[in-house]
Image (cartoon, coloured by chain):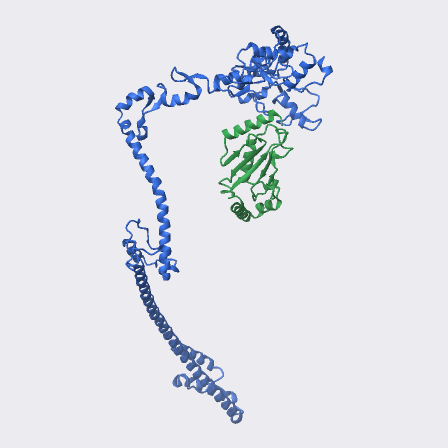
Chain colours: A blue, B green
């Protein structure tokens, strides 16, 4: 009727729609529109409810069909999103969704899946070749999955679940088989559409009869502005300006003051003995602790310790800037020293000079209040002589420069003498070696000389032998032409008899047959002599 | 992605947390639960010991009907991990044709860890590295250790 004359208002634009409607057909207060107003009136404590009030009769006439309609809008619970009280048996879990089965089916290969999961898996597979998601066993395209054994269904039905609206406050916990009934029919916390026709915000079933609660109100106590439907929760649990009972004692006071009351006043709240800072383990209700305090020595000492602690902390806080100041002063001092003694300045191993050093007593009078800085010598500048190191550690850390130079000098001298002795030792060894070698070479030369001598003798003998042969040959050819063979045998005999008498070097008369034998024995003799 | 799949990923994450693999840490973001960031230490008995590897597991919208996509964000010298900026890994149950919806992420993590301990050169994505692994094991070990030092510290 009204929609024919004007455009349908957007769902949440309540004010606009109401005003336009009231202007167009003020004579017909719309039942849907009026329901929330009436409801808010009936629940007395609302400030600033919407204006305009229809009769309660109109309200009653309107609410009942609405409830039915909103109930019809309830969504059936999704079994995959349920919160199970106990961890379900792993045999009841679908391998695809990892939830307990929802309407399980069985394949010919004895694998079980939720009906929905199986459909999804088959949707993802190429057309016309359905397989089992677990074992890839082929399933005929037109074959329906088999039903599961009744016992499996019963086990699934008996699983304890929480109501899906448990986050909104529904305490319902029961077997899964009853869930659908509960959610669809009985759950007071199920979100349904707001009874106001032009308000699409969800509202809990239990608040449905109160009409539309989606308008701002301000809390009586704290004057915060909030939606009407949240008002009760706010007043019950969070409003700081409402009275709330103390959880420990029977006192009732503003929520704002509750924490302070529990922390400091409440006689029933559990507190620790004040001696706990020094180790008293006693903790009980505040009243009992007060009695304990009189007897507890640690509680008596506690204030004293607290004072001490505070003083230590104060001193530490003061100490910190002092340390920094000393550091700055030290730096400045070393800069000044470097300026005064530029010889030290470029020697990086002596970055600081000590004011207490005996070197410059008049330049720097002793500064007694300064904490003595650690002027220990940098260890890297030390020579590697261990006894020097020990010495310097036993000394006080100051009086550094001269001492350091002296030790350096000492160690260098040590080093020098060590090098010198090593050098002389080396020299002795070398000369010894050379002598030995000389000896050997000399002997070698002697041997060689002897050998050469022998060779000379042999050569001499050979030469003389050839000469002799040549002369005897010419003599025999000229003198004895007829009886050559007889003379040859005679000369051979004479030479054989002459060997022992002549002895080695002065042999004469070499015959053709005999001389090699004799010569061999000679050379052997000469070898042994060598 | 359907709520069922999200729920399943949540459950798998809980399972991984209840039964953690040694040296594996999962960074899980409630807002974007389809992308897991894995921090995996090189197994002690492998050449990757001492390395810390960052991996990513991306769940496709069709999960669990399509396999998750695994990629190494840290460079690794491994025959089964591609040697580019993707660092992708595609073998065994991660192959689309091999994947089955009942497979779980934890088994994927097991697979990755086992591959670090023992690479599979016969199913390699980097053939030259696989060849190195098969024929010149000492050289492979040396390069792998070198890469651990260079990229995975």
Q: Residue at x 31, y 32 (%)?
A: A306
Query: Considering the image in quadrants, where does the C terminus of chain A appear?
Result: bottom left
Q: Residue at x 35, y 74 (%)?
A: A435
- Residue A520: quadrant of the picture: bottom left
Residue B18 percent coordinates (x, y)? 50, 29
Residue A128 percent coordinates (x, y)? 71, 26
Closer-to-camera residue (A436/A251): A251
The answer to whether residue A186 of the structure is visible from this angle is: no
Q: Left or right: A93 with respect to A122?
A: left
The answer to whether residue A66 of the structure is visible from this angle is: yes
Closer-to-camera residue (A370/A520): A370
Residue that protrudes farthest toward the top in the picture: A57
Q: Left or right: A476 with respect to A262?
A: right
Question: Up-down: is A469 above or below A97?
Answer: below
Q: Residue at x 63, y 21 (%)?
A: A116
Residue A196 percent coordinates (x, y)? 63, 14
Closer-to-camera residue (A294/A47): A47
- Residue A156: quadrant of the picture: top right
Residue A240 percent coordinates (x, y)? 46, 20
Question: Up-down: is B140 above or below A148?
Answer: below
């Amino acid at each position: 009727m009204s929609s024919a004359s004007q455009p349908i208002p957007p769902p949440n634009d309540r004010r606009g729609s109401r005003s336009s409607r009231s202007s167009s057909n003020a004579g017909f207060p719309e039942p849907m529109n009026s329901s929330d107003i009436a409801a808010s009136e009936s629940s007395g404590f609302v400030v600033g409810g919407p204006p305009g009030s229809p009769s309660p009769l109109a309200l009653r006439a309107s609410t009942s069909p609405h409830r039915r309609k909103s109930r019809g809008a309830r969504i059936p619970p999704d079994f995959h999103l349920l919160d199970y009280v106990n961890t379900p048996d792993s045999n009841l879990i679908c391998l695809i969704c990892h939830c307990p089965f929802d309407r399980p089916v069985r394949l010919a290969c004895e694998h079980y899946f939720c009906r929905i999961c199986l459909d999804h898996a088959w949707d993802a597979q190429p057309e016309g070749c359905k397989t089992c998601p677990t074992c890839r066993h082929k399933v005929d395209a037109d074959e329906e999955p088999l039903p599961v054994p009744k016992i499996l269904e019963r086990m699934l039905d008996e699983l304890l679940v929480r109501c899906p609206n448990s986050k909104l406050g529904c305490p319902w916990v029961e077997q899964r088989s009853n869930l659908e009934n509960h959610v669809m029919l009985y759950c007071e916390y199920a979100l349904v559409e707001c009874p106001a026709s032009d308000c699409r915000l969800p509202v809990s079933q239990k608040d449905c009869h109160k009409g539309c609660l989606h308008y701002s109100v301000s809390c009586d106590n704290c004057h915060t502005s909030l939606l009407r439907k949240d008002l009760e929760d706010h007043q019950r649990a969070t409003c700081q300006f409402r009275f709330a009972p103390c959880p420990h004692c029977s006192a009732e006071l503003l929520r704002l003051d509750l924490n302070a009351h529990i922390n400091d006043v409440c006689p029933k709240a559990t507190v620790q003995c004040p001696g706990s800072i020094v180790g008293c383990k006693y903790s009980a209700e505040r009243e009992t602790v007060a009695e304990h305090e009189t007897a507890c020595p640690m509680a008596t000492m506690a204030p004293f310790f607290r004072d001490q602690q505070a003083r230590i902390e104060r001193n530490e806080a003061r100490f910190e800037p002092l340390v920094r100041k000393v550091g700055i002063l030290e730096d400045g001092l070393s800069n000044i020293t470097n300026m005064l003694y530029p010889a030290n300045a470029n020697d990086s191993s002596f970055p600081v000079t000590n004011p207490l050093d005996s070197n410059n007593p008049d330049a720097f009078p002793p500064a007694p209040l300064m904490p003595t800085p650690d002027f220990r010598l940098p260890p890297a500048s030390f020579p590697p002589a261990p006894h020097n190191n020990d010495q310097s550690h036993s000394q006080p850390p100051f009086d550094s420069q001269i001492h350091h130079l002296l030790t350096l000098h000492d160690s260098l001298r040590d080093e020098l003498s060590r090098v010198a002795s090593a050098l002389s030792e080396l020299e002795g060894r070398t000369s010894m070696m050379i002598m030995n070698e000389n000896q050997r070479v000399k002997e070698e030369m002697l041997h060689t000389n002897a050998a050469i001598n022998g060779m000379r003798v042999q050569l001499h003998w050979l030469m003389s032998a050839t000469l002799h042969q040549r002369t005897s040959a010419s003599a025999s050819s000229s003198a004895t032409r007829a009886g050559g063979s007889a003379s040859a045998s005679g000369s051979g005999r004479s030479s054989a008899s002459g060997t022992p008498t002549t002895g080695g070097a002065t042999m004469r008369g070499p015959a053709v047959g005999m001389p090699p034998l004799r010569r061999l024995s000679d050379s052997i003799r000469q070898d042994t002599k060598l | 992605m359907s709520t069922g799949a999200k729920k399943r990923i949540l459950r798998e994450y809980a399972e991984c947390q209840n039964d953690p693999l040694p040296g594996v840490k999962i960074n899980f973001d409630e807002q974007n639960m389809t992308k897991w960031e894995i921090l995996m230490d090189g197994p002690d008995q492998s050449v990757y010991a001492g390395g810390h590897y960052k991996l990513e597991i991306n769940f496709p919208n069709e999960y669990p009907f399509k396999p998750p996509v695994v990629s190494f964000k840290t460079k690794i010298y491994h025959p089964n991990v591609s040697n580019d900026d993707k660092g992708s890994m595609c073998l065994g149950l991660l192959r689309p044709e091999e994947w089955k919806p009942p497979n779980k992420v934890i088994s994927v993590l097991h697979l990755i860890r086992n591959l670090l301990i023992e690479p599979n050169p016969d199913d390699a994505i980097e053939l030259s590295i696989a060849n190195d692994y098969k024929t010149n094991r000492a050289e492979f070990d040396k390069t792998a250790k070198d890469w651990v030092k260079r990229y995975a510290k």
